[in-house]
Image (tube, rainbow, N blue to C red):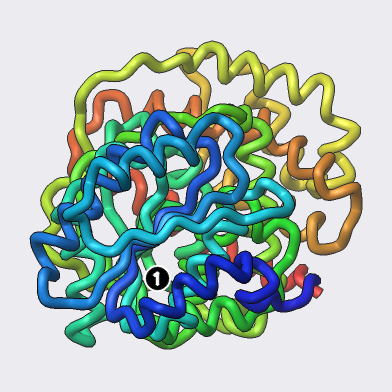
Amino acid sequence: MGDRIPAKDLVPVESLATLDTARPSELVVGIPVLNHARSIAQVMESMAMGLAKHFPSRKAMLLVVDAGSQDGTREVIRSWKEKSPDAPLIQDVYLTGPALRGRATLAILLLVRHLEAQACALVDANLTSAAPAWVYQLLQPVLQGEADYISPVYTRLMSEGTLTTNLAAPLTRALYGKRIREVMGGCAGFSAKLASQVVEIDTRANDLDAYGMEMGLTTEALVSGGKVVETHLGRKMVIASPGEPDMATMLARVTGSLFGLMERYRAFWEPIDGSSPLPQTDMPASFSSEAAEIHVERMVRAFRLGLKDLLPVWEQIMPEETLAHLYPLGLLPVDEFRFPPLLWARVVFDFAVAFHEWRLPREHLLRALTPLYLGRVAAFLAEAQDATPSQFSDLLDHIGQAFEEEKGSLRARWR
């Protein structure tokens, strides 16, 4: 567990001095940046337009914090500022130290408190679908006291976001009792009070990757007792930045952060049973039946390979009862392959317990989940490909219910 990081130790002194001249700022739109030269100008343009249109009389700031880009992002930001003299107040801050996007997110949270802001919207620099209207949707409910945290909901293809739909969202639902759809949605709106609560939490290494701080903010919102509201933002479109991790690395980082949060918030989640939906703003259908290329056969092959090569590792993580249900899956032909949600929830909780008990080096343990995740996604996509949006929503609900059902076993083993 790390130490708290005050703003003066994370943000350069000269940047703090410049920001001091803008205190207090009622509203902040924060954009954490790391190697986003291809998308940052577009996101800044949309957010600046949103502030100008929806909050013209408010003292507002567009705050861009770069965690150490090496792809020309800094030059793009400077050029955009020079070409946009009529934009709302823009401050760009450049951090020294390890190039971790979570450090930029943490700096924004610290600076929200430093600037004495009432509300903040956090928007990833690669979210090219970010629209000016998002500024209003993410900030206005907070300003009106209707929400402490605004979580996004997107219209997605059924094959998109499987790490969220099959792991992050159902796990979070079962643990914290709220049916939140996005745990790492790339943007959020929140109160200054919530930002202060997050920065008071000791920072760990996993918190500072691309996903840890965002998931930590979402989870703190759920456990803080504040009002969490979901709002629909349309399609989510992103541009990958250089150095984006491969699927196995992303899975390990996301799962490691989720398990780390389980350790931090055990006293909160342990007594919770069941779940309830979150309040929502106007919510159109959030799934599209548009066809997408699906490589189920490749995923099933990866599962079979894992069953062959990783079995000695899995035997140290999962009990024989779980393994006995996995063995027959390796014999199924692709068109009959199934990986039921209840078995998947059991696998995830087995890994969580093994992670908590340090049975193996944690990075090694988390990567061993990859073939199992691919098997689960293969089964999920095969089941979802002919579903209507309504049927797909029911399918997601069944996954969440499975995690809730398995939580009793997790509780009994978590020591």
Picture coordinates of residue 349, whole percent (x, y) = 67, 56
Quadrant, the N terminus: bottom right
Please tell me which residue lies in front, 280 or 302: 280
- Whether residue 264 is visible to the viewer of this picture, yes or no, is no
Residue drawn 52% across the image and 80% down it:
272
User: Going by the image, does 207 lie left or right of 228?
Assistant: right
Quadrant that contains the C terminus: bottom right
132 w.r.t. 368: above or below? below
Residue 98: % across, % down: 73, 50
Residue 248 falls in image quadrant: top right
Above or below, 324 relative to 28: above
* 262 horizontally vs 137: left or right: right
Q: Position of residue 22 (x, y in %)?
A: 36, 77
Is the residue 334 above or below the residue 224 in the image?
above
Q: Which residue is mark 1?
A: 178
Left or right: 110 as drawn, with respect to 380: right
Residue 4: image quadrant is bottom right
- Of 151 and 19, nearer the camera is 19
Q: Nearer the viewer, residue 389 or 231?
A: 231
Under tag 1, what secondary structure?
A: loop
Residue type beneath disc 1 = Lys
Label 1 neighbour load within 10 Å: few <14, some 14-19, many 20+:
some
